Image (spheres, grey):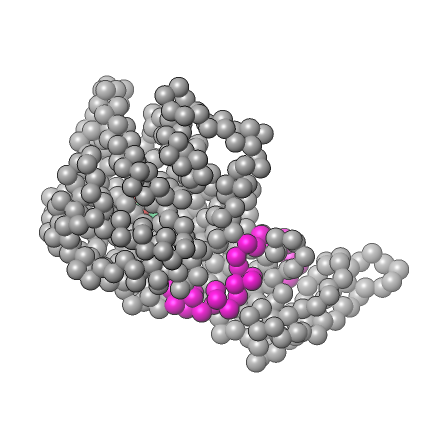
Amino acid sequence: AIFTIGTSNAQSFQESKEQKEKRMQWFQDAKLGVFIHWGIYAVRGIPESWSFYNGYLSYDEYMSQLNGFTAKNYDPVAWAKLIKESGAQYTVITSKHHDGVALWDTQASDLSLVKKSPAARDLLTPFTKAVRNEGMKLGIYYSLLDWSCKDYPHETRTSMRYQVKDDPARWERFLEFDKKQLTELNKQYKPDLYWFDGDWDFNSATWKAKDMASMLRSYNPNVILNSRIQGYGDYETPEQGVPIRRPASPWWELCMTMNDSWGYAPTDTNYKSANMLLRTFVDCLSNGGNLLLDIGPKEDGTIPQEQVDILKEFGRWTKKHADAIYGTRAGIPEGHVMGYTALNKNQDILYIYLPYKPIGPISVKGLKNKVNRAWIVGNGALLETKVVGKAYWSSVPGILYFDVPEQVQDPQITVVA
Ligand code: FHN
C-alpha cells in the first residue's frame, strides 16, 4: 500500500508500508518515554489550562501566574539525565498547552515565558539540547487549539468568540498562527515526534490536517505524529488506561499521570505506587505498546520528589530487565499464562512478567515448540522446567511448569525468559 499525504502548496509525501515500518522503528522499539507538563499552572498548582476554561478562576487570575513563574532552579541537563536514568528512550515536553503560553521565544505572539514571566528566557532550547546529548529522541507537545489567541473560536466553556462558518477569514488567520509557531518549532528543534493535542473542536478538513502533516514532513520526512491531528497521525494515543482489547495497530502509546494531575499539583497526593506503574508498563509491553509516563515540574523547575523516586525505581527495573523491554513485540494471547507476556523481535524468546509472588510453580499452557531453556532476566539463573500431559502419540502440547525461587525474585516484577 502507498499512503499519500500531499497538497498543492506543500511538498507531497508518499510512503510504502515498509517505509512506514522503518520510520516507526525507533518508536516501536523505545517502549518507555517521559512526558513533561510544565507551564504557569505550576505556580498555583492548579489544573493546566482547564481551570480557567471551566471557570474555576478568571482568565486574568490564571494568567497572573505568569508573574510567579521563575524557573530559577531549572536544570535541563539534570532533567535529561534523570529521564535517561529512568530507562526512557524519548521524552515529550509541552511547548505550549491550551492556555497558549509558549516555552520558547515565539515570534507569533507575545505570550511566552520568555517575554511575560520572570524566567525571561527560552526554556525549550536548552532542554532539547540536553535530551539529544543524552542520546534520546525528542518529542514536542503542541496544543493545536489556543484559548488565548483571539482568532481561536472557543474562549471558555460558556463563551464563544465566533463560528468558523461565519468568519472563515478569521479561522484562516488562526491556522496561519499555528503554522507560524509550528514552523518555528520545526526550524529550531526539528523534533523526532510531534505530540498534538486539542484537535477536538473541529474536523480534519477545518484543521486542514493534510496540509499541516505535509508541512511538518517537508521539514523532517521521518517525523512521527501522534493521532490527535485528525486522521494524519502515525500511532494511537490512549490516555490514562491500557485499552482492554489489544489495539489493532502495532504502534500505540499510553500516556499516564503518576498522580491524577498532568502538571504540578501539590494537593493531589493520589500517587500510584512504582509497582502499579510498572504493572501498567508491562501491560503496555504485553500489548505491543509504549508507556509515556508524565511528570509535572514546579514553577522553579524542581521535579517533585515523589516523581523523582518513581523515575528512579523505573530506572532500577528497566536497567535490570532491558532485554525484556526494548525492541520487544506483543506477547501471546491471554489464557496461556497467569501474567503478562511479550516476545523478542525474532519471536523465539517468550518473556513472562510476574506481577505477583508465586505460590508454587508457574504454568504455561499451549506451547507447541520445545523449550530449550528458561531463565530469570537480569540475573541469568536457569530454571528447571517440567512438561506434563504431553504424550508422544498426542498433539496436545501439555503444560510447562517451572518454579521461581524466592532468592531470584525481583521486589517489583520478576521476569522469566
Ligand atoms: O487537555 C489535555 C490535558 O490537559 C493533558 O494535556 C492531556 C495529556 O494527554 N491531554 C489533554 C486531554 O486529552
Single out the residue that lies furthest toward the front.
Answer: 133
- Left or right: 150, with 415 as reference point: left
Does the image show residue 245? no
Residue in front for this viewpoint, 151 or 141: 141
Residue 207 lies, in percent from the top left, at 34, 28
Q: Residue at image x 46%, y 28%?
A: 13
Instruction: Please give the count of numbered marks on the rendered protein.
Output: 0
Residue 244 lies, in percent from the top left, at 52, 50
Above or below 180: residue 369: below
Numbered range of the magenta stretch: 311-337
Single out the residue that lies furthest toward the bottom.
Answer: 407
In which quadrant of the rendered image does the N terminus lie?
top right
- Left or right: 413, with 301 as reference point: right
- Left or right: 379, with 179 as reference point: right
Above or below 152: residue 73: below
Q: Does the magenta segment cover residue 326?
A: yes
- Left or right: 84, with 281 as reference point: left
Identify the image quadrant of residue 174.
top left
Identify the image quadrant of residue 142.
top left
Q: Residue at image x 64%, y 70%?
A: 375
Q: Does the magenta segment cover residue 401?
A: no
Q: Residue at image x 53%, y 66%?
A: 321
